[in-house]
Image (cartoon, rainbow, N blue to C red):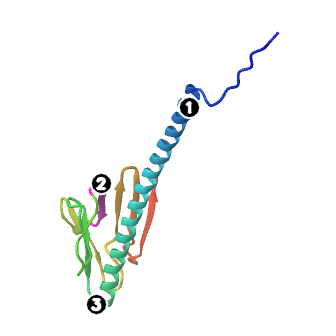
Amino acid sequence: MTTCVRKSRGFSLIEIITVVFLIALAIGAVSISFSKSMSGAKVQAATRDLVAALRYTRGQAIVKGKETTFNLDLGGNSYQAPGKPTVQLPKNMRLTLYTADQEITSETSGRIRFFADGASTGGHISVLMERVEWRINVDWLTGAITREELNR
C-alpha cells in the first residue's frame, strides 16, 4: 500500500489576505493616533508662542513703566504684542478670550492690559483645535501667566 504524502509549500490565499488585512488595520490605527498627537503638538506649540508674547507684553509694561496691551482678533484668529508683527494662527485653530468688560474692543476682538507694576486686567485665552484645548490664564493681581491643557 502506498501513501501519497503531499508537502505544502507556501501559504494559502486566505492566509495572505488575512495578514494583509491585519497590517492595513494596524497602519490605520497608528496613523489616526499620529494625527491626533500632531494636532496636540500644534496647539501646544501655538500656546507656548502665545504665552511668550504675553510675557513679552508684561515685561514691556514693567521696563517702560507704562501700560501696554496684548491685542487679540478672534475673528481674524490672530494676536499681537506691542511692537511685534501680528501672529496668525492656522485656520483649524480657534481662539477664545475671557477678560474684563472694558477690554472688549468689539464683538470679535479684545485685549489684556498690563500695568507698570506687572499687574493686569486678567482673564484667560483658550486655543482650540479639534478635541484639544489649552487655556492660558493671566492673573489680574500679579500678571502671572500660566497655561494648562483641558480635557474635552
In the rendered structure, which segment of residues is drawn in magenta? 91-100
**Vertical placement of residue 38 versus 47, above or below:** above
Give the mark, 3 or 1, whose residue is nearer the N terminus: 1
Neighbor class of circle 2 (other Cα within 10 Å; few <14, some 14-19, many 20+) is few
**Residue 116 shows up from this direction:** no
Secondary-structure class at tag 1: helix
- Nearer the N terminus, badge 2 or badge 1? 1
Residue neighbourhood size for the residue with mark 1, other residues' Cα within 10 Å, grouped as few (<14), some (14–19), many (≥20):
few
Relative horizontal placement of residue 55, taking residue 79 as reference (left or right): right
Is 61 situated left or right of 135 in this image? left
Single out the residue that lies furthest toward the front.
Answer: 2
User: Could you say where residue 5 lies in the image, as x and y percent from the top left?
Assistant: 74, 19
Q: Nearer the viewer, residue 86 or 82?
A: 86
Q: Which residue is mark 1?
A: 16
- Which label sits in the foreground, 3 or 1? 1
Instruction: Name the secondary structure under disc 3.
Output: helix
Secondary structure beneath disc 2?
Answer: loop
* Labelled pair 3, 2 in contact (Cβ < 8 Å): no
Magenta run includes residue 109: no
Residue assigned mark 2: 92
How far apart marks 2 and 1 lie (CA) works out to 40 Å
Residue drawn at the location 45% of the way across and 63% of the way down: 148
Query: Whole-Å distance between the Cαs marked 3 and 2?
Result: 36 Å
User: Which label belongs to residue 35?
Assistant: none
Q: Is residue 93 magenta?
A: yes
Q: Nearer the viewer, mark 2 or mark 1?
A: 1
Q: Position of residue 101 (x, y in %)?
A: 24, 65
Q: Which residue is mark 3?
A: 64
Q: Measuring 38% from the left and 77% from the top, which residue is drawn there? A: 143
